[in-house]
Amino acid sequence: MSKKPDFDALVNNKRIDNVDTSALNILFSLFDKPEVISFAAGLPTQELFPREELVKIAPKVFIEDGAKSLQYGAAEGYAPLREKILARTKNLYGVEKSLDEILLASGSQQAMDLFCKTVIEEGDVIFVETPTYMGALNAFQQYFPKFVSLEMDDEGISIEDLKAKMEMYPNAKCLYTIPTFQNPTGKRMSLARRKELLEAVKDTDLLILEDNPYGELRYSGEELPTLLALDDCDRVVYMGTFSKIFVPGTRIGWVLGPKELLAKMKKFESAGELQGNTITQHLANAYMEEFDLEAHIVEIKDCYRKRRDAMLEALEKYMPEGCTWTHPDGGLFLWVTMPENANTNDAFDYCVAEGAAYCPGEGFFANDVKYNYLRMNFSPHTEEVIDKGVKMIGDGLKKYLATL
Amino acid sequence: MSKKPDFDALVNNKRIDNVDTSALNILFSLFDKPEVISFAAGLPTQELFPREELVKIAPKVFIEDGAKSLQYGAAEGYAPLREKILARTKNLYGVEKSLDEILLASGSQQAMDLFCKTVIEEGDVIFVETPTYMGALNAFQQYFPKFVSLEMDDEGISIEDLKAKMEMYPNAKCLYTIPTFQNPTGKRMSLARRKELLEAVKDTDLLILEDNPYGELRYSGEELPTLLALDDCDRVVYMGTFSKIFVPGTRIGWVLGPKELLAKMKKFESAGELQGNTITQHLANAYMEEFDLEAHIVEIKDCYRKRRDAMLEALEKYMPEGCTWTHPDGGLFLWVTMPENANTNDAFDYCVAEGAAYCPGEGFFANDVKYNYLRMNFSPHTEEVIDKGVKMIGDGLKKYLATL
């Protein structure tokens, strides 16, 4: 009989232990409870997936283009799709980039992994918002950075705090921000703040990683320029995705940035994955050729605007006293603040017992975890279900608060 | 005006410099020369892609299953597809595994990345074959291992050399092998050697990473058990892929291994990519439900067997004296040895000038690079084109040899 290898000893425990996905466990517990109305995950609504349209383009993608769409492809992604994304970037944001300034990735998550491989060394300081997207923290954690959290107000990152932290950490490598309809808060950085941010860092080597999965989902308020558009020195590395405006199952994200950096990221795309998904890159490309993506996004926005309004209305009706929440102009989420002595991990079970679930806020803090926050996703449910589910959440929170 | 960040200084140059993809540059040079008959890349033939079949299952995948196929999915991959792969593994290799012992990845390349994140620490010794797959070297290089090369003969890894190297490196982490129709040589490890290999490591913690993209493409000789099937102690981590038996554009690979290890790899799948590609996982699953994958593989084998035979015949006819080559029983490749004073990087241009290209052997050596080898891929071209192209290669090599 052979010796069974000692897996606990032989794996890279340092890396495994540094990636803290424990905040997800409470969400995984929902998988066995499909009857629960969940506002927990960040899912787009499946009703608006362009199913018939994908069937219509199947002959084009699989037969006509099969020699390319089914074969191995380029590490940087399918050129016609990259051209279309660049054309949209120009239309939407007034930013002109060339084909060597765009790299396709297997979703923004994998784009972050490529960015980290290329940029982050152990101990490097990454500035993050408070709170920030937990998935980004997990991607970064694989590479052992030091997170330094920046304070936020309703206009976005506090520039005063940023300046203080830059003085403390003059060699910080990058600042990760979701300036538009942030995950988890739904907040949008004001135009003045965007300009102040770029001004504050203008003499440094600090990279700004702008994550913009929700920017096109604006339901109210004025259009604001992206940081990418305001950047005058190739400092902003920008990430976009088809997940929220088309189909998450395509797993297509993209990075726009300086070509020196992208050439290096492409090296890791080759080494770590060979290439992205040729089939879904061709599907997205054919969809944009045959159908009107812009009209599809208008449809998504009309749907989500009603759902956001329904959730804001339901929160007014059902939430216990002492709770407040953000009123986002776009995106998928809003962020609820409970009284300071509340713990949304503990309250979770009370709400699930009523029949509805939210995402506890704990996982969205890189430092100084706060427990009295929760995230609500309004995109996947109809207005009726939102009203019903938020009532359950309100009832559960009231029962929980009565125990304190 | 803002300061442009100093990209050369702020990136992780240690990691960037450690990944040596320079051997690919000579292949990239072929992209602009579509008229050249290329035996360089490892492409499956596009003629056999099941194009019509994919169109037929499109309504099932995009409409009927759209709520799941187009939505976010599980990090470990679509369960029905994992079940089908497990059923095939049982049929083909007599190995029974459970759903928590299989993880889908975005191709074997990404599976290797996950394995490295989970297992490899800087300086860890990885035993590799001489020569070995250059893409695997690139995946490993991202994590700073020390490669220790093992000698090979026609039966596979030299056990004597393995034992000597194990004595020198008693804490080696893993042994990477492609035992069946190896890339680049086409060699197959004999049954005796497979057993000796497992016997030699049986008292150690050494993991064996068995990469088996070509095992099902056998054109002659007896079926041999996989290392996975011979393993009695969960030492073998096995990688399979749909790239060579179905469609490379699906980007679906899988890892079979001990569940303790796979649970850790899954953590990095979440952190580094969220999940694999839901759409193509559903496409592969529906294809296996509606069509006969086994019959499709028979068709591929019938095609490639003829092409292998045609290439062996053409090599006999056209290669210069002093060259020898392997006679593989399966896979996509064979490996040519030129006289010791030859350099296949230099000879490359002579062959391209004649109108055909091969893959120089340099990139397949982890240590002690040899320059007198080249790899030929016989899968993508018809017998006629193979004859024509190998003649060009032979002519080019003769012209090159005359200059020495």
Image (tube, coloured by chain):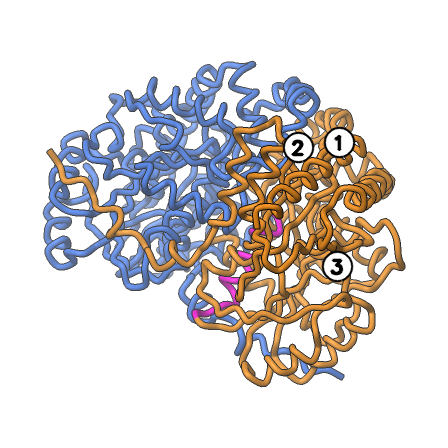
Chain colours: A orange, B blue
Part of the protein shown in magenta = A107-122
Q: Nearer the viewer, residue B381 or A385?
A: A385
Q: Is residue A261 above or below residue B287?
A: below
Circle 3: residue type: Lys
Task: Tell me the chief SS of the magenta region.
Answer: helix
Residue B26 visible, this angle:
yes
Q: Earlier in the sequence, mark 3 or mark 2?
A: 2
Q: Position of residue B188 (x, y in %)?
A: 26, 34
Vertical comparison of B119 with A119: above or below: above
Q: Residue at x 52, y 73 (%)?
A: A125
Check the picture and name the quadrant holding the N terminus of chain B: bottom right
What residue sits right under mark 3 in the picture?
A: A187
What residue type is disc 2 on? Answer: Ile
- Label 2 – label 1 distance at C-alpha: 8 Å
Q: Is residue B24 magenta?
A: no
Visible residue check, residue A297: no
Secondary structure beneath dot 3 equals loop
Mark 2 and mark 1 lie on one chain; the one further toward the N terminus is 2
Cβ atoms under marks 2 and 1 closer than 8 Å: yes
Label drawn at residue A37? 2
Chain identity of mark 2: A
Q: Chain of mark 3?
A: A
